[in-house]
Image: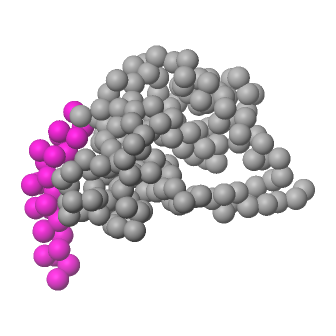
Amino acid sequence: MRLHLSDEGEAMAEGESGKEKEIEVTVREILEGSDMNDMTEYKVRKEASSRLGIDLSLPNYKSLVRSVVQSFLEQQTVPKDEAVDEGSDQVAGGDGGGGDDDEDEDEDHVICKLTKRRKVTMQEFGGKKLVSIREYYSKGGKDLPTSKGISLTEEQWSVLSKNLPAIQNAIKKMESHST
């Protein structure tokens, strides 16, 4: 059996990339024909597993499905006419701590860049607005989302933001104990 490297640098058997493409196409078909108010990543993965006869709960496949769902979500919700200067770690006009809505090359509504590869974005999925904090990688001159990150609903974001003072106090206590 011959092995080669995927775009993400993982070793995989020859023919695996064809299987990945088949999985991606199937997942996208499922998403396009679904009621997004009722659809979850688990349901997409389960349906795609059934259609393809492949166990998509295995870690590599699970990650692939998550990535396709995230990509689909981002493509469905954003206009395609603005971009952020990729040489900057901050959103144009921003200080890295929030501010102006802008969009990156993937058309996310970028709220801020936490680092060169970690962004806070706003998007809509299944009629729900989401705040996402996600890592990105570069491919073909574009920043693309990875599966590393979290998306919070408005309700979850509200709970988190209301508890920021408690989180900050806990951080201060941890810092004082470590000195």
Q: Residue furthest right?
A: 1
Report the span colored magenta: 155-179
Colour setting: one colour
Residue 30 visible in the current orientation: yes
Q: Residue at horizontal 47%, vertical 36%?
A: 75
Q: Nearer the viewer, residue 95 or 130?
A: 95
Q: Residue at horizontal 52%, vertical 30%?
A: 42
Q: Residue at horizontal 10%, vertical 61%?
A: 169
Q: Nearer the viewer, residue 167 or 146?
A: 146
Magenta stretch prevailing secondary structure: helix
**Magenta-span inclusion, residue 162:** yes
**Residue 93: quadrant of the picture:** bottom left
**Total count of labels:** 0
Residue 173 in the image: x percent, y percent? 13, 68
**Magenta-span inclusion, residue 22:** no
**Residue 11: quadrant of the picture:** bottom right
Q: Is residue 126 left or right of residue 19?
A: left
Residue 55 visible in the current orientation: no
Does residue 47 sit above or below 19 in this rendering?
above
Does residue 38 sit above or below 152 in this rendering?
above
**Residue 179: quadrant of the picture:** bottom left
Residue 171 in the image: x percent, y percent? 17, 65
Q: Nearer the viewer, residue 1 or 137?
A: 137
Q: Residue at horizontal 67%, vertical 32%?
A: 25
The quadrant of the image that shows the N terminus is bottom right
Q: Residue furthest bottom?
A: 179
Q: Is residue 56 left or right of residue 91?
A: right
Residue 108 in the image: x percent, y percent? 38, 44
Residue 101 in the image: x percent, y percent? 25, 47
Q: Is residue 103 left or right of residue 71?
A: left
